[in-house]
Image (cartoon, rainbow, N blue to C red):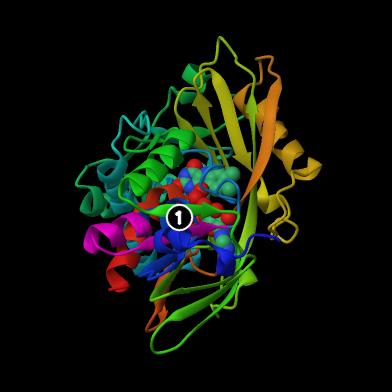
């Protein structure tokens, strides 16, 4: 007979399935942070984290590891289609989220390196547009970060990094990079050390709640808990939460080692639609979703030639025009996006909360979203 939650032993029931105070769905950065902070706020609570994947299935162990809060061209793009107060509120959340991440996991533990980031402009019009708003952007960022002149033009960037076909580069001195595998492993360790169990391969198909409990239907049968916290990001449309989130696939590749690599730091091109960084002396680059938004609105973890070619074009034309390189590995992950960049953190009813729609900044905001979820679940 196949495993079912209904045929566990007395001991397994005592350990795993009975008297649950909270079930958290999703073991990405948001679910792990939510579970950890719930336990911190309720030390006696019995908490179970469920994930349908053998690994966190979507973004938290597949991302590029940028510790960023916004490049000038991306923020200006956002300001052109979103009310100003909303844009800065989201930037502030990313900044605070990065501080929360450092406090939770430790800078060394995730190998956080604040080497700076560069926003690369391919033409004069884009450069002039940034210059026209630079003072304003820096003023707003000072009130968020406490630092003056967060953005500044770096006239030597192309020469120093060996780029071609660029008009200008603007440096953000406060952004950095981290090791994604260390981040997810450290977060899992924090959660397990706090006495929380993570069960993998368990998919929540649907849920219903009443005055006393939440009942989950999973691929291994029914589970009951006093509260449910949903952190399913790009997979949220698969369960009925009436929350508007769309999946968005993000594709990346990494080169083999390039001993003479000069590209040390994190970089953005085209309003953040392309991003690249060094990983030791390898170069990791991702993006190109803007080449076919519709096709990339999927939870299929495939890579496609169109997007991969778009990424390689940037590599050959701008980033490594004179350096021979070979691709070592390519992969894709699933983000959760919507009509706004702000994440959704809310109560669905008296027993169910949800924290989703992290966009391309979940590394930055994920810890804080989990913390806030833990607060509203009380
Ligand atoms: C290629 C790529 C590059 C990125 N680069 C960066 C970056 O450099 N910096 C940055 O800040 N952000 C980046 N992001 C975004 C960031 O990784 C995400 O925003 C963040 O990881 C989202 O975390 P999460 O916990 O909300 O969701 P996820 O990590 O997506 O976790 C959700 C989990 O829920 C599980 N799940 C879903 N449905 C169910 C269900 N019904 N039952 C059980 N389990 C379920 C999934 O298996 C998954 O493990 C990138 C994303 C990708 C894909």
Among all residues in the image, which is located at the extreme top?
259
* Residue appearing at x 55%, y 49% in the figure: 56
> Is 58 on the left-hand or right-hand side of 170?
right
Which residue is drawn at the image coordinates 66% and 44% (left, top)? 332
**Where residue 2 appears, x then y in whole percent?**
69, 60
Residue 368 coordinates in the image, percent (x, y): 33, 57
Confirm whether the magenta stretch covers residue 254.
no
Q: Nearer the viewer, residue 160 or 295?
A: 295
Q: Quadrant of the C terminus?
A: bottom left
Camera-side residue of 67 and 21: 21
Q: For this view, does 112 lie left or right of residue 206?
A: left
Task: Residue at 47%, 18% (x, y): give it.
Answer: 160
Against 152, is 245 above or below? below
Q: Nearer the viewer, residue 155 or 354?
A: 354
When asked about the image quadrant of residue 210, the answer is bottom left
- Tell me which corner region of the image, top left, top right, bottom left or bottom right, holds residue 153: top left
Q: Could you tell me which residue is drawn at 40 percent across and 62 percent down? A: 14
Is residue 312 left or right of 118 when viewed as pictured? Answer: right
The residue that disc 1 covers is 76
Range covered by the magenta-colored residues: 35-51
Q: Is residue 257 left or right of residue 32?
A: right
Would you place residue 204 above or below residue 145 in this image?
below
User: Could you classify mark 1 by the number of other residues whose Cα lies within 10 Å: few (under 14), some (14-19), or many (20 or more)?
Assistant: many
The reply to whether residue 2 is visible in this rendering is: yes
Q: Nearer the viewer, residue 110 or 251?
A: 110
How many dots with numbers?
1
Q: Residue 125 at x, y = what percent?
A: 54, 46
Seen as rendered, the residue at the extreme right is 305
């Amino acid at each position: 007979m196949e495993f079912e939650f209904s045929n566990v032993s007395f001991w397994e029931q005592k350990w795993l399935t009975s008297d649950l105070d909270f079930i958290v769905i999703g073991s990405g950065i948001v679910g792990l942070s939510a579970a950890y902070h719930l336990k911190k706020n309720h030390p006696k609570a019995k908490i179970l984290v469920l994930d349908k994947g053998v690994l966190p299935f979507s973004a938290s162990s597949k991302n590029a590891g940028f510790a960023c809060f916004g490049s000038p061209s991306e923020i200006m793009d956002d300001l052109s289609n979103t009310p100003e107060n909303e844009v800065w509120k989201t930037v502030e959340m990313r900044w605070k989220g990065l501080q929360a991440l450092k406090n939770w996991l430790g800078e060394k533990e995730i190998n956080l390196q604040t080497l700076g980031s560069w926003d690369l402009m391919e033409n004069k019009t884009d450069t002039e547009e940034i210059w026209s708003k630079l003072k304003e952007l820096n003023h707003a960022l000072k009130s968020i970060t406490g630092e003056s002149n967060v953005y500044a033009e770096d006239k030597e960037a192309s020469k120093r990094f060996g780029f071609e076909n660029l008009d200008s580069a603007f440096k953000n001195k406060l952004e950095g990079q981290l090791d994604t595998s260390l981040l997810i492993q450290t977060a899992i360790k924090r959660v397990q050390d706090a006495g929380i169990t993570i069960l993998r391969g368990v998919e929540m198909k649907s849920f219903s709640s009443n005055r006393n409990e939440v009942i989950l239907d999973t691929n291994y049968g029914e589970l009951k808990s006093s509260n449910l916290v949903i952190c399913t990001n790009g997979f949220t449309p698969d369960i009925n939460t009436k929350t508007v989130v769309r999946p968005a696939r993000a594709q990346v590749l990494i080169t083999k080692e390039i001993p003479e690599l000069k590209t040390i730091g994190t970089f953005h091109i085209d309003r953040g639609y392309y991003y690249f960084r060094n990983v030791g002396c390898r170069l990791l680059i991702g993006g190109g979703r803007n080449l076919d938004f519709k096709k990339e609105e999927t939870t299929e973890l495939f890579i496609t030639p169109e997007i991969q070619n778009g990424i390689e074009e940037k590599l050959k034309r701008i980033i490594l025009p004179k350096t021979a390189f070979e691709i070592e590995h390519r992969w894709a992950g699933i983000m959760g996006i919507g009509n706004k960049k702000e994440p959704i953190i809310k109560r669905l009813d008296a027993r169910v909360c949800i924290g989703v729609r992290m966009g391309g900044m979940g590394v930055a905001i994920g810890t804080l979203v989990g913390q806030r979820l833990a607060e509203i679940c009380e």
